[in-house]
């Protein structure tokens, strides 16, 4: 039931994975190359850019970061807020699968649509978003999403569930154009706010035209260096004060725990003994302890344990790391330092110091 609704006619619905594979195939048959597992580590600026990656050095005249969020340190990290979003695929008891995709306007919001896979229908529903690293118990959004679904649909079972990340632009509009603070030949497309199917096409058109002819009719609207936000200035202030409070507040009052006591398999926490450096400690499904230095290698906020994804997530700009500290998600480019994993060593007062010394 709803009080008021807006219906958009004439919409297309895409299967994103099939679509992306199709695009990749078309790109390769046109002579393009796609290298996977190739991390950019550094870029030497100049008329010819030298891009240092994990698979060698590449030279190019132009470079576009179409990488979710650009790696390294850039003012766009202060203007994009990282969010986690939750999704479930459910089977219904009564076959009343909705015909159209729909969104509500709640905060946090929800959406749903029908997807057919292998001849079977599923209701895919998502939402319950929150800022990355800002939800203490990441299983709760799934519980809330499940209750929401049960309120409106006859659920037979939840077949799949997963979470993902997106970057919300501070003033509501993506950043597409020249990367601020870099040489003229470096471009970026980011802050798609979960609307990548739409924005990626705008970005492709704007950036290719900018590179070929030097200007595009939308270049000012999407300009990543815009000082005056397009809309929602109060939101801009809010997102940035969140970053500041994660940076300062986390350091002051987050170390509520000073021991490993009660740490269950599949969970993790940051521990801090008085006078010593903090440690991020997690236990995998078989009870093995993994320990890392929880200071994010991007701009030094303290990472938080994400119990759903078994990852360390940074509440400031959304970098994510595995249990053992490997980078999963930019803007971080350097792994978290590992730490001693023996219980005896972790209990040892000097453990925290050892992490920093190893670093
Ligand atoms: Fe910027 Fe962690 S992502 S400090």
Image (spheres, grey):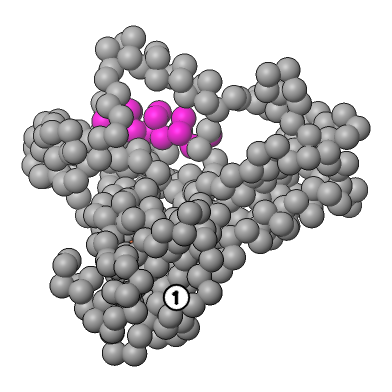
- Residues in magenta? 198-211
Residue 74 seen in render:
no
The residue singled out by tag 1 in the image is: 260
| Relative depth, front residue between 12 and 230 | 12
Compared across the picture, whether 151 is left or right of 226 comes to right
Residue 206 among those drawn in magenta: yes
Q: Is residue 68 above or below residue 77?
A: above
| Residue drawn at the location 53% of the way across and 33% of the way down | 197
Residue positioned most to the front: 344
| Residue drawn at the location 17% of the way across and 33% of the way down | 55
| Relative depth, front residue between 180 and 45 | 45
Q: Main secondary structure of the magenta part?
A: helix
| Residue drawn at the location 46% of the way across and 20% of the way down | 21
| Residue drawn at the location 26% of the way across and 76% of the way down | 351
Residue positioned most to the top: 29
Q: Is residue 167 above or below residue 188?
A: below
The image shows residue 15 at horizontal and vertical percentages of 59, 24
């Amino acid at each position: 039931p709803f009080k008021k609704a807006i219906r958009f006619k004439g919409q297309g619905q895409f299967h994103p994975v099939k679509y992306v594979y199709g695009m990749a195939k078309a790109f390769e048959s046109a002579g393009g190359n796609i290298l996977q597992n190739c991390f950019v580590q550094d870029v030497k600026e100049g008329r010819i850019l030298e891009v240092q990656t994990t698979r060698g050095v590449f030279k190019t005249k132009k470079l576009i970061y179409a990488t979710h969020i650009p790696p390294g340190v850039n003012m766009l990290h202060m203007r994009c807020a990282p969010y986690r979003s939750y999704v479930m695929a459910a089977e219904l008891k009564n076959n009343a699968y909705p015909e159209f995709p729909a969104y509500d306007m709640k905060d946090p919001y929800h959406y749903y649509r029908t997807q057919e896979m292998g001849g079977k229908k599923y209701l895919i529903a998502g939402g319950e978003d929150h800022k990355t690293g800002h939800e203490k118990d990441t299983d709760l959004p799934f519980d809330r999403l499940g209750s929401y679904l049960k309120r409106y649909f006859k659920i037979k079972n939840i077949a799949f569930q997963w979470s993902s990340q997106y970057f919300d632009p501070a003033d509501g509009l993506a950043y597409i154009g020249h990367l601020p603070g870099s040489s003229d030949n470096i471009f970026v497309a980011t802050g798609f706010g979960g609307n990548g199917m739409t924005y990626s096409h705008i970005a492709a058109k704007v950036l290719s035209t900018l590179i070929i002819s030097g200007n595009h009719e939308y270049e000012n609207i999407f300009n990543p260096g815009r000082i005056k936000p397009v809309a929602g200035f109060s939101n801009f202030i809010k997102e940035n004060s969140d970053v500041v409070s994660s940076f300062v507040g986390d350091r002051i009052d987050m170390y509520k725990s000073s021991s490993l006591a009660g740490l269950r398999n599949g969970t993790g926490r940051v521990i801090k003994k008085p006078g010593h450096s903090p440690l991020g400690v997690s236990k995998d499904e078989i009870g093995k302890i993994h320990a890392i230095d929880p200071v994010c290698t991007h701009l030094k906020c303290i990472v938080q344990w994400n119990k759903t994804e078994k990852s360390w997530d940074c509440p400031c700009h959304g970098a994510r790391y595995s249990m053992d500290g490997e980078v999963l998600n930019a803007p971080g480019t350097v792994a978290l330092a590992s730490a001693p994993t023996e219980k005896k060593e972790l209990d040892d007062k000097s453990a925290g110091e050892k992490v920093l010394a190893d670093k």
